[in-house]
Image (cartoon, rainbow, N blue to C red):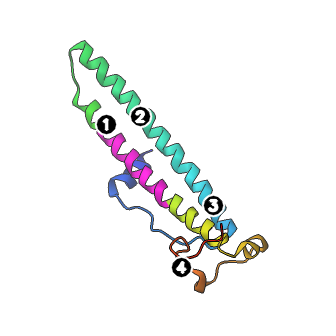
Amino acid sequence: MEALMARANEGSHSEFEFVRSLSNLLSLNVYARGIKRAIKAFRLGIRACWRLYSEQIRGGSQDLDAIVALRQFRKCERFYKDELAILRDMKKEYRAYVFGGHIWDTLVGKERSESDLVDYRKLPFKLF
């Protein structure tokens, strides 16, 4: 959890990269599942901090640590939601590449060539 929070504090998102093969897509899906679990963990942290702070208010003693932790968890949640959006863009672009006329190459296991590394979402044609 500390490493996830440290990365969120750095603010360095992953760069958009072109998915080159079906195996890259599968590993991207595994990474995306991990990011979703991290977001869920931060949501649980937000709820726990909110409950703690609410109890402190009812008890008449407010602790600044609960507010700081709440803000930190929200910042981390936002960071990883943005990270997940980048991953979804990468998957969406690969889907456009595959259905843009490269279904057979993908099924055979051929890796995407350098000449095909263009954003297929922005090309003027669509197959489906």
Residue 126 appears left or right of 13: right
Q: Residue at x 73, y 72 (%)?
A: 103
**Is residue 3 shown to the viewer in this render?**
no
User: Pointer 3: what residue?
Assistant: 27
Of residues 7 and 123, which is closer to you in this image? 123
In which quadrant will I find the N terminus? top left
Amino acid on which the number 4 mark rests in the picture:
Val
Amino acid on which the number 2 mark rests in the picture:
Gly
Q: Residues within 10 Å of mark 3 (few under 14, many from 20)?
A: few
**Compared with residue 1, is residue 11 higher up or lower down, i.e. above or below?**
below
Amino acid on which the number 3 mark rests in the picture:
Ser
Secondary structure at badge 1 equals helix
Q: Residues within 10 Å of mark 2 (few under 14, many from 20)?
A: some
- Decide which of tag 1 and tag 4 comes sooner along the chain: 1
Residue 90 appears left or right of 45: right
Cβ atoms under marks 3 and 4 closer than 8 Å: no
Q: Which residues are magenta?
A: 69-86
Cβ atoms under marks 1 and 2 closer than 8 Å: yes
User: Pointer 4: what residue?
Assistant: 118
Q: Residue at x 26, y 33 (%)?
A: 67
The residue mark sitting in front, 1 or 4, is: 4
Amino acid on which the number 1 mark rests in the picture:
Ala
On residue 45, the disc is 2
The magenta stretch spans residue 72: yes
